[in-house]
């Protein structure tokens, strides 16, 4: 008799690994040395903060800069870094240091964690992920530290530069400015705005795209995936910047009182941060309804697959848009960049978008039942921000009831790992259907 226990598949291991990391972080944040008052956080608030950091979201029930000691802040920063790159990436890094061989099972886990289509060359990709991350975060930290040194002591400026560089490259949005201000004091500062926008964008492109760009001088080619990510990112960024500029131009509470350069920088930052960083330079509650709705859309979409960002991913949006356009044109095939999109990809895009939409609707509905005193858009904004692991909030997060906090914790966890990954992890082992049903015709439209 074969008594060998069935092994866990990659989705189960990823879910369990992230859950274990969150619980470890929560325990550390409950320690007296983690908070300025010496009492530590309550279990629920610690769990919320650890989940937000590990899932690189940025929603906070207490202000990071005002509440935590250096120990608490560094704990959050560590969770952001490990959660952003994935615990399997860091495990592989330690395997490298120990000279341990990466097994086939570990390569499959890395393939799942990085959302790669194949495990061929996955170890080389992980090495480059670590190099890309180190270089980008160090450059970002140096620029921000130099700029912050004009406003604070050099030691604190270096610390702030490192913290905000790691936080924004990993699309987390945690900040140390205090009083829930985020980066609003720097709304007209080109150095801070452009540096943070660059960090957010690079973190959201995805490591597969970054690797192809790095190899372009040798291969002289880019995959369809990379082309879609780059073009869609450019369209969404420029389009959203223009729309926000128009929506907020005359709003004296946001862009109206700023210089022309400040208006452009404010619009650009507000267009970039929903995908999916969480820092802000404009007071969100003062934004027009049009801008808030656009921000909700951007948070729902997110950035590139295999990146530090959340959302349904821009490749999903591009695939759905191309499918609709092909149907309107009466074409049988969906084609992007002269390549036909296979039906499996289209079905997966539909599944991801629909499951995400249902999750956001459900969470919004639950928030309206457990919270009171706010407009509907506050709840929809909070639910979408949590699912997209964005971290932007209209001020609802610190006011959440215990049940509301649990709902948002669950939503951030689902958003970081993806509804499909979580569903695969909790479901029974998937088996192909032993037979096919006869076809049925359904009237659509």
Image: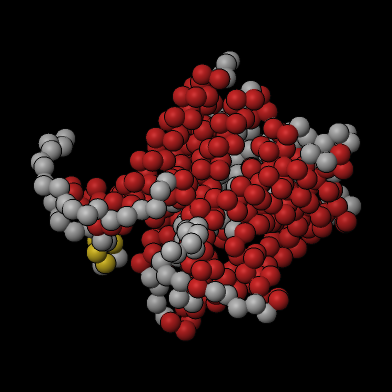
- The quarter of the displayed image where residue 91 is located: bottom right
Q: Position of residue 404 (x, y in %)?
A: 59, 26
When asked about the image quadrant of residue 285, the answer is top right
| In this rendering, position of residue 91 left or right of residue 72 | left
State whether residue 304 is above or below residue 416: below
Colour convention: secondary structure
Q: Which residue lies at the image location 88% right of the left edge and 56% below the top edge?
A: 155
* Residue 127 found in image quarter: bottom right
- Is residue 72 at all visible to an observer of this figure? yes
Q: Position of residue 202 (x, y in %)?
A: 56, 60
Residue 171 showing in the rendered view: no
User: Which quadrant would the N terminus be assigned to in this image?
Assistant: bottom left
Q: Residue at 24% across / 47% down in the picture?
A: 324
**Relative horizontal placement of residue 240, taking residue 82 as reference (left or right):** left
Instruction: Name the residue located 66 percent from the left edge and 73 percent from the top edge.
Output: 95
Foreground residue among 265 and 136: 136
Of all residues, the one furthest to the top in this rendering is 373
Quarter of the C terminus within the rendering: top left
Q: Nearer the viewer, residue 95 or 116?
A: 95
């Amino acid at each position: 008799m074969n008594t060998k226990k069935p092994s866990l598949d990659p989705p189960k291991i990823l879910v369990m690994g992230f859950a274990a990391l969150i619980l470890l972080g929560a325990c550390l944040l409950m320690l007296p040395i983690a908070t300025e008052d010496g009492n530590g956080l309550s279990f629920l608030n610690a769990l919320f903060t650890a989940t937000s950091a590990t899932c690189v979201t940025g929603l906070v029930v207490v202000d990071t800069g005002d509440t935590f000691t250096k120990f608490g802040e560094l704990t959050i920063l560590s969770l952001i870094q490990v959660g952003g790159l994935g615990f399997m990436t860091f495990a592989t890094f330690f395997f490298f240091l120990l000279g341990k061989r990466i097994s086939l099972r570990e390569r499959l886990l890395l393939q799942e964690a990085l959302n790669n289509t194949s495990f061929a060359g996955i170890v080389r990709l992980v090495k480059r992920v670590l190099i890309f991350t180190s270089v980008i975060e160090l450059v970002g930290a140096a620029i921000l530290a130099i700029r912050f040194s004009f406003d604070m002591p050099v030691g604190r400026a270096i610390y702030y530069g490192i913290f905000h560089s790691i936080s924004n490259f990993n699309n987390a949005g945690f900040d140390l400015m205090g009083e829930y201000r985020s980066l609003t004091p720097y709304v007209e500062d080109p150095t801070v705005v452009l540096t943070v926008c660059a960090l957010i964008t690079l973190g959201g492109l995805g490591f597969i795209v970054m690797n192809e760009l790095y190899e372009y001088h040798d291969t002289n080619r880019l995959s369809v995936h990379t082309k879609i990510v780059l073009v869609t990112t450019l369209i969404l960024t420029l389009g959203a910047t223009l729309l926000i500029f128009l929506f907020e131009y005359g709003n004296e509470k946001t862009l109206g009182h700023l210089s022309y350069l400040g208006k452009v920088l404010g619009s650009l930052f507000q267009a970039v941060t929903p995908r999916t960083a969480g820092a802000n330079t404009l007071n969100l509650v003062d934004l027009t309804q049009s801008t808030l709705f656009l921000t909700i859309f951007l948070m729902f979409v997110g950035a590139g697959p295999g990146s530090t960002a959340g959302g349904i991913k821009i490749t999903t949006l591009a695939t759905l848009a191309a499918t609709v356009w092909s149907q309107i044109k009466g074409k049988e095939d969906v084609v992007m960049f002269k390549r036909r999109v296979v039906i499996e990809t289209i079905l997966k895009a539909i599944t991801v978008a629909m499951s995400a939409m249902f999750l956001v609707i459900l969470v919004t509905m639950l928030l309206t039942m457990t919270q009171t005193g706010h407009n509907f858009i506050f709840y929809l904004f909070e639910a979408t921000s949590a699912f997209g692991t964005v971290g932007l909030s209209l001020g609802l997060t610190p006011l959440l009831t215990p049940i509301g906090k649990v709902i948002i914790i669950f939503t951030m966890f689902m958003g970081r790992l993806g509804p499909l990954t979580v569903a695969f992890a909790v479901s029974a082992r998937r088996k192909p259907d032993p037979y096919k049903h006869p076809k049925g015709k359904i009237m659509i439209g």
